Image (cartoon, helix red, strand yellow):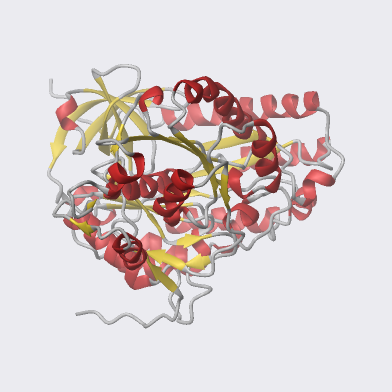
Amino acid sequence: METLPLVAQPTVDYRARLEQWAASYGAIRDEQSIWRLPDGRTLAEHLFGKPRPTYRILTWGCQMNERDSEILAGQLEEMGMVPTEALDEADLLLLNTCAVRETAEEKVFGTIGYLKAIKQKNPDMILGLCGCMAQEEATIRRIQRYYPHVDLVFGTHNLHELPRLIERVRREEGMVVDVWKSADAVVEHLPSRRADGVKAWVNIIYGCDKYCTFCIVPTTRGRERSRRPEDVIAEVEYLAAEGYKEVTLLGQNVNSYGKDLDVDFDFADLLARLDRVPGIRWLRYTTSHPRDFSDKLIRTIAESDKVTEHFHLPVQSGSNEVLRWMNRRYTREYYLRLIEKIREAVPDACITTDIIVGFPKETEEDFRQTLDLVRQVEFDNAFTFIYSPREGTPAARWPQLPREVKQERLERLMEVQYEINLRKNKRLVGRTVVVLIDGPSKKNPAVLSARTRTNKLVLVPGEASWAGRFARVEITRAQTFTLEGRLLELLPDDAAEIGRHGQFSPYGPPARVEA
């Protein structure tokens, strides 16, 4: 058996804490892992005063938020709650929120306003707001002043306290606000109701220490806290045993993994170890900070079989002056050299990025440097955003550019990037690719949605029963954001070509068509 270094990282065992709380009700866990009282009722039935109480979770934001919602759902189902799609039938409705951009926040407030009528018709329903917005003092003040129909507000650091928080709402009068400013320990053994049976998200690090001047994440998610290697490995091995085929490692900055641990075990070491987990075929990760993308990490990815060739590296700007004001801690030249090193080691790399336009102090020349960098790198895709001031960040206090200037620059940037997207996708027409099929697409159930190793979206006509299968596909058409293809063959899960070592490139040669 492999021996891993012992890590003195403070952790909290969720199972032990919940068991202690449940014992106050005399509850024990049944064979379905549901907590039941001596009279047979579940904890949820006791707290809500009705059989089989229901819940619904609405989620905004990144994969970290999606993963948090899975954990929230896992806690609720262990209490005996059941999911519902109908908002007006939910006994508990949670809004798991994102604070990165103003537009996302306004959507949440609009939703809270809409839910007032539902709350009036069902006053016993618990309406809760959680996630990153709850960590903002301005949000709490706004909720308390304008949205008194909200029953519960809690943040990112104490989502594992949800059962106790529900208990407080049922017992106390008025709105319950319980937001922790920080988390000193990592909580392990959290229950989960995963949204997918083939692909899974796994947290490896929480928080961020970079303090970019535009970003609210250090405020909403706290300082960096890495999970112990043995806990991450154990979770991935469990997922493999459960039949999962793809795992995405999550963190605000996965490249910082291990820096806060007292052993020499970094993100590259973690990838190398997880590359050996039987059953898992593809490993992804998000998000990376360019400053921490080491030569060791590039080498590890290039030598791995399961780590995919998709590199998402947010550049944010192509101007050194803007990067300095953003506190990104790298230069344009550093970033371009990093791209060169990645493509030297992984020639078939797919590189995507994030770019902010209209940042305070950005001049027309600064923006032109961004356009020049985009043309030079030729990203496979870029997620482009107009700068959105976030209260509590340094950049929000600086003079802002006019809205029309920001919009005009965004449109120019998108025009350049979209042309690159389409041109690069057209190169794949006639090629064969290996994909993992997600299932029927949202627009047409007769067409399946699938992803390549490089995370390109491929639409393939086929049967819903193919969901969760690997397949070899010929690309027949390219569009700006999607590829279209036809199925050549469904692959067994142990097919060598699914991994990097089993193929020269994730894009094989043009498919042979029999005469």
Q: Quadrant of residue 383?
A: top right
Give the residue drawn at x 25%, y 36%.
Answer: 52
Q: Quadrant of the N terminus?
A: bottom left
Q: Is residue 101 visible?
A: yes
**Viewer-side residue, 29 vs 383:** 29
Q: Position of residue 277 (x, y in %)?
A: 23, 63
Counting labels gives: 0
Residue 180 falls left or right of residue 71: right
Identity of the residue drawn at 49% across and 56% down: 158
Q: Is residue 224 left or right of residue 159?
A: right
Quadrant in the picture for residue 88: top left
Q: Is residue 26 above or below residue 480?
A: below
Near-viewer residue (34 or 286)? 34
For image coordinates 43% across by 30% down, the residue present is 425
Residue 504, compared with residue 448, is above or below; it is below
Question: Residue 325 at x, y = what percent?
Answer: 79, 52
Residue 324: where, in percent of width, then height? 77, 55
Residue drawn at point x = 59 percent, y = 64 percent = 223
Seen from the viewer's position, the closer of residues 365 and 64 is 64
Quarter of image, res 273: bottom left
